[in-house]
């Protein structure tokens, strides 16, 4: 099953059969950092492209309009001044590294605002970047595929403009869909047949890439993706429990309380990389407290998974399982 993706959290040390992998492997972290770096660099490269276009194309020459539009992901800074009590709790969780850092990571999420996707460049507070474009996974994300298509069109138009200036032949393989606009038409050749003159073919409107449409499709499919991930996680848990003759328990950390009246808590299951809800059977729990839980019932099709205390130490670890991060 999945591993935790929070590099700031500590790895509980255990000499039991439930040992789990480190939060993030060096290879996983390297790929993540390179993808973020690529998204930031790509966002800033847009201005280099625009400056080159201005320098290479003289206003006297016939040319295709060529502006690169990218789907910048931005997030505003959280408003901390209006929530001093919650900020104090968050800072204390961070200072004490409650739960090895997991509790602070969980609690701080409530302050962040939703991400917006727009064509104007703005900062991303969550990542701490001046700009960010998500474009490294065109196979699995439609928005990334749109970004790739926009860059290809930009580069093709740039080359076509260069051919127009030089009076060279535009390859016949270039079509409307490749440029997002009509291919310039030949109007005459020079006397020595070394140069060609072109004219633009006007159409009612260009085939522009609409990132809002792409974002709408992603928003519509996101619930399906989450349900699919949840189903296979619960299916894995069900098979794991049914294939074992002994009690299968999981080491968990209490992230925080969701409903004080019902003793409903958010927990993190280390072995599964799973954040889930748990109704306490022993009353109030403390953030960062370690629990040993077993599966009470699971139904992947219905999306149901409940935990109960395991027989190990009454469900509460008898000793601390926190250790410095690897």
Image (tube, rainbow, N blue to C red):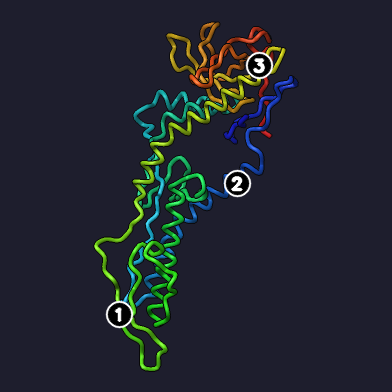
Q: Label 1: state its secondary structure.
A: loop
Provide the secondary structure element on which disc 3 rests: helix
Residue displayed at 40% across by 93% down: 192
Q: How far apart are marks 3 and 2 (CA)?
A: 35 Å
The quadrant of the picture occupied by the N terminus is top right
Residue at x 69% of width, y 34% of height: 326
Query: Could you tell me which residue is drawn at 71 percent across and 24 percent down?
Result: 19
Percent across and percent down for residue 264 are 48, 13
Task: Estimate the x, y position of residue 205 in percent, counting from the top left.
Answer: 26, 61
Q: Which of marks 3 and 2 is nearer the N terminus?
A: 2
Evaluate if marks 3 and 2 touch, with contact meaning CB atoms under 8 Å apart: no
Q: For residue 156, which quarter of the picture?
A: bottom left
Query: Residue, x 61% and y 24% (percent of image)?
Result: 236
Q: Which of marks 1 and 2 is nearer the N terminus?
A: 2
Q: Name the residue under label 3.
A: 242
Question: Which residue was labeled with disc 1?
Answer: 60
**Label whose residue precedes the other's in the sequence (3 or 1):** 1
Residue occupying the far bottom of the picture: 192
| Occupied quadrant, residue 238 | top right
- Describe residue 318's horizontal placement relative to residue 71 as left or right: right
The residue labelled by disc 2 is 31
Residue 219 located left or right of residue 318: left
Label 3 to label 1: alpha-carbon separation: 76 Å
């Amino acid at each position: 099953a999945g591993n935790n993706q929070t590099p700031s959290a500590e790895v509980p040390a255990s000499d039991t059969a439930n040992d789990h992998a480190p939060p993030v492997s060096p290879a996983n972290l390297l790929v993540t950092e390179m993808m973020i770096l690529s998204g930031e660099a790509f966002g800033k490269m847009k201005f280099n492209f625009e400056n080159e276009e201005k320098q290479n194309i003289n206003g006297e020459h016939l040319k295709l309009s060529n502006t690169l539009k990218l789907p910048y992901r931005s997030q505003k800074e959280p408003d901390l001044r209006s929530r001093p009590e919650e900020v104090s709790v968050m800072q204390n969780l961070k200072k004490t590294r409650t739960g090895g850092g997991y509790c602070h990571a969980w609690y701080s999420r409530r302050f962040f605002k939703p991400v917006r996707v727009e064509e104007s460049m703005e900062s991303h507070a969550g990542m701490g970047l001046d700009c960010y474009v998500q474009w490294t996974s065109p196979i699995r994300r439609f928005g990334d595929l749109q970004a790739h298509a926009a860059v290809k069109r930009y580069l093709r138009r740039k080359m076509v403009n260069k051919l127009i200036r030089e009076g060279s032949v535009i390859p016949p393989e270039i079509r409307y869909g490749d440029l997002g606009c009509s291919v310039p038409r030949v109007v005459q050749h020079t006397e020595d047949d070394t140069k060609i003159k072109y004219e633009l073919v006007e159409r009612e409107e260009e085939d522009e890439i609409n990132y809002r449409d792409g974002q709408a499709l992603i928003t519509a499919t996101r619930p399906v993706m989450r349900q699919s991930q949840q189903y296979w996680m619960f299916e894995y848990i069900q098979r794991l429990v049914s294939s074992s003759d002994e009690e299968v328990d999981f080491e968990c950390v209490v992230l925080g309380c969701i409903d004080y009246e019902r003793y409903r808590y958010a927990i993190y299951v280390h072995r599964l990389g799973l954040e889930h809800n748990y109704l306490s059977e022993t009353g109030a729990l403390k953030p960062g407290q370690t629990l040993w839980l077993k599966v009470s019932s699971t139904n992947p099709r219905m999306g149901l998974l409940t935990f109960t205390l395991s027989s190990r130490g009454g469900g509460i670890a008898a000793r601390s399982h926190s250790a410095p991060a690897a």
